[in-house]
Amino acid sequence: MAPADAAMTRSGLYFQRLGALTGYAAAKQVWESRYMRAASLSGGRFFGTPGSDVGSGAQAFSMMDHMAGRPIPKGGSGMLTVALGRLIEANNGVILTGKPVARLIIEGGRCRGAECVDGSQFRAEKGVVSTIHIKHLIDMAPRELWGDTLLDSVELMQPELAMFQFHYALSEAPRYPLADGTVSSCEASIMQYPESIFVLNSDDARGELHLEDCALQVVHPAVFDASRVPPGRGLLKIEGVAPYQLKEGPEYWDAIKEHVADKIVTHYFKHTSNLSKGKILAQFLLSPLDIERMNPAMWRGSVHHFDHRWGSFVPYRMPIPGLYQTGACTAPGGSISGMPGRNAAAVILQDAGMTLQQAIGAERPKSTAGLSTF
């Protein structure tokens, strides 16, 4: 049955209408247990919109995604970057790090390269590909070159709810209590009451923190990937959302980060059967402000770069000739999918007189030579 036909069936219409509800309302329809409602909304939040918002009804089934699991490279997600870097270098590409871009080089109305903060310049024969957040990129060339349509879209971009990440090295891996023993897992989510999902937006609007029952995503894949830890040890990442713009100002995060992390991890340990503060060997704490400092593309602590719900995506072919955009500011947005890169590549190849299918069939497409990516 075609997707369009399936959508007109009784079940198709039901799920379509369920998805248009808030996640909270949908979870009340699907689950009798408040624990399953809370679990669905807590886990569903980390795929995008809070379950308090209209159109988030699919979060009522977020536990199905958790049960299916998510593929992670052995050694951690960073190994994907390592592998891609090796592929580029194996095909005569050069990767330079620690070279933040200060401005685009525009000559004859065309983007010819980029100049870095240290004054070094890199020029491209055919084009420049950017992954810089568009909020920053538009300041790297004269504003009149971008066009009013793009500038209006960028002006209306909104940050998503900012994220914190607290990382811990542990003397042992987390375990969770059951009625007849314990269980380990790769991932968990914690929230006691489904109504707590409504606090996220109000906290963000007021710049306040209410940590008593905030939605937490807890990740510890070293339970199944022993290459990530010494024998018998454990790793833990706790993440959640919190206001970037605190009412005292975003810099106030530097004063309260340690206290917030202590409260969050203490709350988490109560849900385990074997962990306590004495089993923390080391910690690495990232507030929403730290996340933006670490990667300016994570604008205002938005790990997916901005709130994608209103579709203010940046085009792959930018208004300045010779300049292309990819990454989380382009459709379909952030997370690890590879789709923004694939879509941008198709546009770049089209301008070079080649299709993506032709490039995939070639060992080393000559048409991509002369591209510089920042």
Image: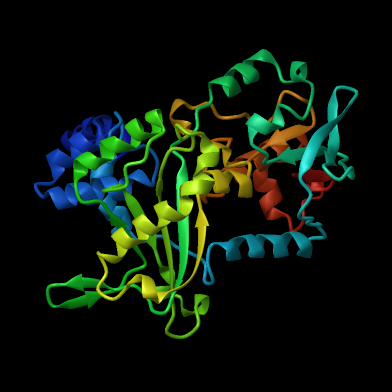
Residue situated in front as seen by the camera: 8 or 24: 24
Q: Position of residue 244 (x, y in %)?
A: 48, 38
Q: Position of residue 353 (x, y in %)?
A: 77, 36
Residue drawn at (83%, 42%), measured in percent from left and top?
A: 116
Residue drawn at (55%, 29%), measured in percent from left and top?
A: 313
Q: Which residue lies furthest to the bottom in this view?
A: 231
Q: Is residue 225 above or below residue 88?
A: below
Q: Position of residue 217 (x, y in %)?
A: 36, 55
Residue drawn at (33%, 31%), measured in percent from left and top?
A: 202
Q: Is residue 194 above or below residue 176?
A: above
Residue 6 can be seen in this image: no
Residue drawn at (9%, 47%), measured in percent from left and top?
A: 32
Residue 99 can be seen in this image: yes
Residue situated in front as seen by the camera: 279 or 34: 279
Horizontal side of 55 relative to 233 (left or right) equals left
Q: Is residue 141 above or below residue 132?
A: above
Q: Which residue lies furthest to the left in this view?
A: 32
Horizontal side of 24 relative to 155 (left or right) equals left
Q: Where is residue 82 in the image (x, y as percent from the top left)?
A: 65, 64
Residue situated in front as seen by the camera: 371 or 313: 313
Quarter of the figure that contains the N terminus:
top left
Quarter of the figure that contains the C terminus:
top right
| Quarter assignment of residue 107 | top right
Tell me how many marks there are.
0
Q: In this view, does 191 lie above or below 220?
A: above
Looking at the picture, the colour scheme in use is rainbow
